[in-house]
Structure formats: structure tokens, C-alpha cells
Amino acid sequence: MDSRVPTRISSSLPSAPSPPLLSYSAQLRTVRAPADAISDCFSSADAYYSVAYTPVPDRHDDELAQTYARQSQFKEEESELSHENLYAEGPAKVVSLGVRDDYKILHGWRRILFFLSPLTSIGSQGSSIVYLMLRGLYTRRAEMEAKRSFYSAWTFVAIESILSISTMIHASWTIFLWRGRKRPQLRLVGSKGLPSIDVFVCCCGEEVDVVMDTVKAACTIDWPVERFRVLVLDDGGSDDLKRLVEAYSHLYAPNLVYHRRVKIKGVPHHAKAGNINGGLERTRTLGWGWQGPGEYILSLDADMIARPEIARALIAHLYLDPNLCLAGSPQYFYNIPDGDPLSQDLRTFFDSVEPIKDSAGVAWCTGSGFAMRRKALDDIGGFPTGSLAEDVYCSSLMLGMGYKAAFIHEHLQCGLVPDSLAGHLKQRTRWTLGTMQTTKKLNWFLFGDRIKQMTIMQRLSGLTYAISSLFNIAICGTFVVFPFVLYSDGNLVPVTNPNQMKLLIRLVFMQILCGRLHELIWSLPGGYLGVRREIQAWAWMAPYHSIILIRSILPRWLGGHASAFKASGSISDGLHERDPDRRAPLWRRAWFMLFECKVWMHVVILAATIASVGLALYRVLTRWIRGRYSFEVVGYELLTKVFWPPIMWLILSLGLWIPILYTISPPDMPDREELLVRDARGVAQPKPERTMTGPWKSHSFSELLMSFTTAFTVACFVLTFFFEFEAPDCKALDSCPKT
């Protein structure tokens, strides 16, 4: 028998019988969601299982027959079953609540329109490629005619190319929307014959109250208490947490266990991966409920409050497909401040990118709220160590062994984001460094025994994210070089005739028009402001990603160092920057964020950019006032030296301004307790309205400026049909080459 196929673990208690292979009407039923919720469905459970199920090779015939029987029973017939008796007593069976797991998130005209995003992406990137090719060609022709090199123009082309390529990398996933995603909303119902689960709550120095809310919610998961155990894996060694967990276990949850692994000084303990591995080892000797490890593990971060249905939603997919080793869910957060100025909400990734990756067979483990088949995890030797992105590393190894992973697009957990700029930077740079560590260990997803069964798309996914991380260094370089380009007083867009200028402007217009339409369509699942915030974060976070990557490869004597792991939730906020009652004064916040959080980088780059623009304007306008430039020459000079559409320096400056504005005026957040509702036993769940963010006071101004750049590009496009964009005589321009 293939070692990857899980077998039922013997139990010290009477073991639950395996679900009998009865007729479909006796065992498996299909539950239809309300008609108005699924009227726009484009796929069916039949199509999903014809694509998603691949038999595990080398299995015994009787096991293959049982697997096929489960799936054929699931799709044999349909019958009605009310939500009230969905979890009634009876044998374990999988039912479908709808043919799509995301029908609540994206449906109707919005879903149809969302499928057009690949067209807008192709239009934007296609026009960008043509534009850059013509820019290089026209610049070279201008050099040949002027018999001089235009270094400023070539530098500007390089900057445009870097920013365009980075955008192309991020937008490349949209094309897989056309493959369609066929993932139904499933539930594993019944109470007899359910598999055993070990629920891990991983913590390391987080606030005890936060951890206990997660623990209490984990203990109330909708699953027979004798078939799941909750293990609190405390890597912070908190005696207070141990005392509270043991007290709660004694009063309410006999299946709750506290575990603290032994860490020997000087011996690497491998952070979260080591903590989970310690929990895996603990379950081998744990005898409560059954003897040994459970068939599945369900892992939660210390601040992630699980919804009661999380196990039945995730395990249902693993239960039907024995080659599916991982089922993950999106992370939602209930302490996002209004406007989310730091772009901490991950809705764009989880609501747009991850479903597309799932359709391409590249779903990742995303750190919390995931269920894994224990046997598959044992096959790769437990959670892999040596990477700060242990979740991505783990799922990559599983894919490399031929297993499959699934992204379940349901709201099954809700947690906390870091409530300080320092904590946010620590978290995001750790993700970037972990991605590169994983890529390096897997030979850039190109070769090696550990990824030999990866598909082309799975390899391309890993390589794409690695290249995207490295491109942060190039993007950061553009920020440094751009002010010097503006300062150079050179012609940034040299052409030899008016038609070339017109064509370039029209291509820019096409690029911006398609790009803005793509932003609007791409934002349908998660919201427009979320996409805008993410684009701005892509700009202002680039220096931090660049520094962490460069320092990770430099020797110590050149300033290099290995980044140490620290749980994001354990990073204390001494400034209380989001608490209006305890917030530190401005001078203290400014000093800390400027130097400890390195916001001085953004101040310097932004000041240099604005100064260079001001100097360029001063030069052109002074020459005009002194009579050295005619009105036509002034317009041409301003267009090619300062205001070339879409006014890139202004767009980049809007992103660089975010951490500065956050330093001056951070958002307010109420106390965490005000964001929760509790039942009689004190089990908390986030208030539904707290998973959505309101507007931030700076967004209107920022969006106004972005709209201005778009309107300016449109105006330039219209003018190409009425005016001749002819370059003035070189002898009239101080900056023209002397021929």
C-alpha cells in the first residue's frame, strides 16, 4: 500500500467505525445553496472532481475501489437537506453547500466582469512592451542624428522598463482566470466515523489574552470532542499561559493540552517550524482520545480565532481526495484600522491571487488556518527547517512529491495584524527573506529530487515570486536614480519627428487606460482601495525588502547579518501609535520611526525628487521669462523633462509619502475587546463589521492626485490629434547637443 494513504489509527477508546459504503441516498447528499446565491455559477461539482481527483499510484485494488466509490456516490444524485440537520447524528459523509466556495465573495455581474481582467492586463502590458521597444528605437535614432549619446534618456528608459517588468510579473497570474476554478463548498457532516484531528495553536510570546481567545475558539470547533485534540504549542515558555490553559482544560475542555518544548542553548530551534515539529512529536505519545497522532492536523496562529465550521469545511476536501495533502483558507483580520494605510489587509492576495493560483494547481500553505494530512507531512520529514517561510517551503515540498494542495475560499478564521509600523516591517521583510531562502533551498525550482514531481506551473510560480522579490532591489535603485535624471536637465524623450512623439503618447495612454481599468476590475473581490493601497505599499516597502535581501548575502564585516525570527504578535508597541489615549508624542514617534524604522530613507528620496522637479521647473521657466524660450519650446521642454505622462515621479512620490504620513498622523484603533463578541462561556468571535475597513482621511487626496495623473495622460492623448509635438531647433535649447 502506498505510504501516503492514511490509515485509521488504533485508539485506546473504542474506535469509531469507518463510514460504510452505502447507497448515495443513505450516505452522501448534495445540499444546494439558495438559488439567488448560486444562480451565476459557472462550474459544477462533477467538473471539479473529474479534474481534481488523480488516483494515488500503487494502491491496492480494494482501496482504489473505496476511493472511487466515495466520489461516485458524491456525484450520483441530488437531494434536499436542510441546514438545520446538516450536522445531525449519523455516519460521516460529504455534502455540498454550493458548486463554488466563493459564491458569497464574488457572484453575478461582478464575477462575469472579473473574468475580463486578463484582457485589460494583456492590453496594458502589451502596449507597455511596444512603448518600451519604440522608446529605445527612437532614442537610438535621435542619438545618430544628433551624434551624441543621451544618457539621461537611456536611464529614464531603464527606469520605465524596471517598473513595467515588475508590474508584468505581478499581473502574469491573471491569465489563469480563463482556466476556471472548480472548487465546491463542501462540509463533512455526521458524527460517526469522523477522522481524528490534532489542532495546533502556535504561540511565541504573544499576549496571553490573545492566545486564550484563540484556544477557546479552537476548543469549540464543530467536531466530536473525542475525535480532536487541541495542543497549545508555547515556544515563549509562558507560565501564565500554562496555568490558564490547564485551568480551562480542567473546567471545559478535557481535550486541551499544553506543550512546551525543551530548547537547548546554542542548538538551533528553527522557530515556528521547530515548534510545530515539537507538537508533531508530542502527539506520538499522546493518549487522550486515541493513541498516537491524529490523521490530520489543523494549525492556527496564536491570534487567529477559528470559526466553528473550519474543520468540517477543510477536512471535507481532504476526505474525498486521498492525493490532496493540504487545504488552506484565507486570513481575515479584525483590527485593521480605517483606511489600512500600511496595506496590512491581505484581501487582494487571498480574494484574487490565491484563487487563481489554486486553479493553476499552485495553492500554498499560508501559515494559519490550514489542514494537512498527517501521513503526507511525515513523508516529507515534518515541517521543513531552514526557511523563515516554513509554510511555503512545506507546501512546495509536498507539491514536489506529487501531492496536491487546495485553497478553500471561505471565511474560516480571523486574526490580528501587527499594530505598529515596526511589527509590520518585521513581518513583511521576514516573508520576503523566507521566500528567497525557500527558493535557494529548492534550486530556484529548476531541478532536484525534492521538486521532481512539480508541474511546470508549480515551478514557474515559485520562480516568479523569487524574481519578484529580487526586483525590489531594482525598484529601490530607480528611486535613487530618478532624482538625478530629473536634475540632469537632459531631454528624457528624444525623438526625430512629431509623429514619433504622438505615437509614444498614445501608447502611454493605452497603457494607463488598460491599467486603470484592470485596477477597477481586479478590485471587485476585495475592494478598490485595497488594490490602490497595495500598489502604494509596493513602492514604499521596496527599500526595506532590498535591505533585508542584500544584508542576508553580505558578510558580517560589510554589514550583513542573518535575520532572526520573532513572532509578529510578540513585537511590543511601546509607542502605542494606534491608541489615541496612550499614543506617544509626535517628537518621540518621529525619532523612532525615522531612525529605528528607517523612514528617513523615504524622506530623503522624496525631498530629492521634489527638489529635482522644482529645479527643472525653475530652469525652464527662467529661460522662458528671460526670452530664451518661446511658448512652444517651453511646452515641449516641460513635457519631456518634467511632465511626461503619466507623471511617474508624482505616482512614486505618493507611495513614498505613506510611511511619513503614518508617522505624523497614525490611525486610531479601539481596544481589542471592543472588536469582539463573547458567548456565555467567554468564547470570542470578531464582530462581522470589523473585517472591513473604512476610509482613511488621506485617501481622498491621494486618489485625487492619481486621478489627476490619469486625466493629464488623457489630455495629452487628445492633444495629439490637434497639435504638432515638434521638437524646437536644437540651437534654441541650452540642453541640446552641439552638432
Image: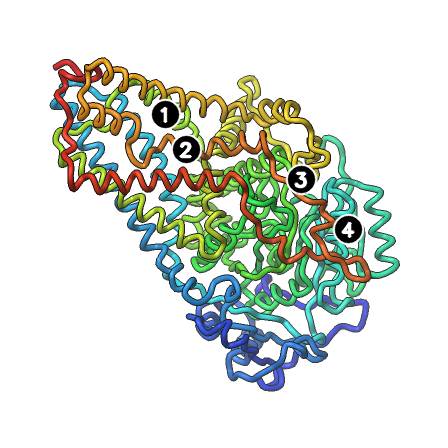
Q: Which secondary structure lies at badge 4?
A: helix
Q: Residue at x 30, y 50 (%)?
A: 122
Does residue 33 appear left or right of residue 446 in this picture?
A: right
Q: Which residue is mark 2?
A: 652
Which of the marked residues, 2 or 4, is nearer the chain's N terminus?
A: 4
Q: Which mark is residue 212?
A: 4
What type is the residue that disc 2 sits on? Leu
* Residue annotated with mark 3: 567
Residue at 56% x, 43% y is: 340
Dot 4 alpha-carbon crowd within 10 angstroms: few under 14, some 14 to 19, many 20 or more: many
- Residue at mark 1 to residue at mark 4: CA–CA distance: 50 Å
Taking 188 as reference, is 363 above or below it?
above
Label 3 vs label 1, nearer the camera = 1
The tag on residue 494 is: none
Q: Are marks 3 and 2 in contact (CB under 8 Å)?
A: no
Residue 115 x, y percent position in the rendering: 38, 60
Asked whether the residues under the numbered discs 3 and 1 touch, taking CB atoms below 8 Å apart as contact, a structural biologist would say no
Q: Nearer the viewer, mark 1 or mark 4?
A: 1
Amino acid type indicated by mark 4: Met
Judging by the rendered image, the residue that carries numbered circle 1 is 482
